[in-house]
Amino acid sequence: CDKITPGMLMAAMRLNIPTVFVSGGPMEAGKATLVDGTVRKLDLVNAISDAVDESVSDEDILRIEENACPTCGSCSGMFTANS
């Protein structure tokens, strides 16, 4: 996700066309209410790690997957695209 913006800008410069580039910014963190009523803030790392955790129920996995990416934008974690 950290290579998309520079790649698009390099392509626009190479084509030598007028360009307005608007970055979407970072995505908001997700929030899921689990079966037991617990509310958790989420990002994609949570969804991936919880999917292989045997102690997390299938219903909770579904709620986490449905809420991990609530908006548009780059990854919500403090990874290379947002640092």
Image: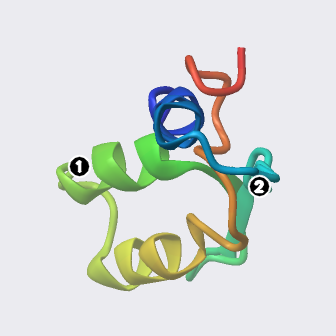
Q: CA distance from mark 2 to mark 1?
A: 32 Å
Q: Which residue is mark 1?
A: 53
Question: Residue 67: x and y, percent?
Answer: 60, 75
57 up-or-down from 50: above or below: below
Q: Amino acid at mark 2?
A: Gly
Question: Residue 8: x and y, percent?
Answer: 52, 42
Residue 39 shows up from this direction: no
Of residue 36 and residue 12, the one placed in the foreground of this image is 12
Q: Secondary structure at mark 2?
A: loop
Rendered image quadrant of residue 31: bottom right
As drawn, the label of residue 24 is: 2
Of residue 49 and residue 74, the one placed in the foreground of this image is 74
Mark toward the viewer: 2 or 1: 2
The residue that appears at 56% across and 42% down in the rendered structure is 12
Question: Residue 53: x and y, percent?
Answer: 23, 49
Q: Quadrant of the C terminus?
A: top right
As drawn, the label of residue 76 is: none
The residue that appears at 56% across and 64% down in the rendered structure is 68
Mark 2 or mark 1: which comes first in sequence? Answer: 2
17 up-or-down from 4: above or below: below
Assess disc 1: are there few (<14), some (14-19) or many (≥20) residues with their C-alpha within 10 Å of its C-alpha.
few
The residue that appears at 58% across and 44% down in the rendered structure is 75
